[in-house]
Amino acid sequence: MFNLDQWKTKMQDVETHFTGEMKKIRTGRAHPDMLAEVKVLMYGNPTPLAHAANVTVSDATMLVITPFDPSQIEAITSAIRNDPTLGLNPSDDGRIIRVPVPPLTEERRKEIVKTANEKVEAAKVALRNVREDARKAIKSLKEAKTAGEDELKRYEKQIDDATHEFTAKIDGIFSEKSAEIMKV
């Protein structure tokens, strides 16, 4: 028997991952997720920033990072400074790190939208892969002769409809994020 819910769950996972990727994209306003990909070299091991410090927003243009271990301030500062995709210049006072988020130029906004568009394409490819896997499962039902032609057609239509539904959701998320990025 064909279980549409299992395939919808996989498509939901693609959408959830895509939403997380969109949250990491810089929009000109300070947001803790901006630093989600930063890895700090602590005690010889690359460690996610979230495991090394608490990141908060003090206002729309300032992130405040409070390290769990104050001796790691320099490592955290250099990890943020050395990430060219961020373009941020943190400063510390020995206890906390302040990261000013400069306003984005028009050119930089367009680059960010282009990068976001690449993530949209990757998400759509992932959705198509899930659809293709579902079609293979439907084909195996046909070969095993465990379902009639009408049932198989209905299953294919259901999986195509689900694919279109999730593609539309991803496009909607992207258009909202693009508008947010381009907003001055």
Image (tube, rainbow, N blue to C red):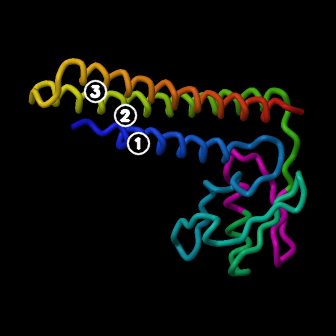
Say which of 108 and 145 sits in front. 145
Residue stretch in magenta: 78-99
- Name the spot of residue 103 as percent of width and height, x first: 88, 41
Q: CA distance from mark 3 to mark 1?
A: 14 Å
Mark 3: amino acid:
Arg
Residue designated by label 2: 130
Q: Quadrant of the C terminus?
A: top right
In the image: residue 175, left or right of residue 167 = right
- Magenta-span inclusion, residue 138: no
- State the image quarter where residue 65 is shown: bottom right
State whether residue 154 is above or below residue 181.
above
- Name the spot of residue 26 as percent of width and height, x first: 74, 43
Say which of 61 and 150 sits in front. 150
Pick whichever of labels 3 and 1 is earlier in the sequence. 1
Give the number of the disc on residue 10: 1
In the image: residue 1, left or right of residue 48 = left
- State the image quarter where residue 163 is shown: top left
Mark 2: amino acid:
Val
Please give the name of the residue rendered at 16% of the width and 30% of the height, measured from the top-left corner. 141
Please give the name of the residue rendered at 64% of the width and 65% of the height, measured from the top-left corner. 49
State whether residue 92 is above or below residue 71.
above
- Magenta-span inclusion, residue 95: yes
Q: Quadrant of the N terminus?
A: top left
- Name the spot of residue 70 as percent of width and height, x first: 73, 80
Give the number of the disc on residue 135: 3
- Binning the other alpha carbons within 10 Å of mark 2 as few (below 14), some (14 to 19) or many (20 upward) gives some
- Tag 1 and tag 2, C-beta contact below 8 Å: yes
Please give the name of the residue rendered at 24% of the width and 23% of the height, measured from the top-left corner. 152
Q: CA distance from mark 2 to mark 3?
A: 9 Å
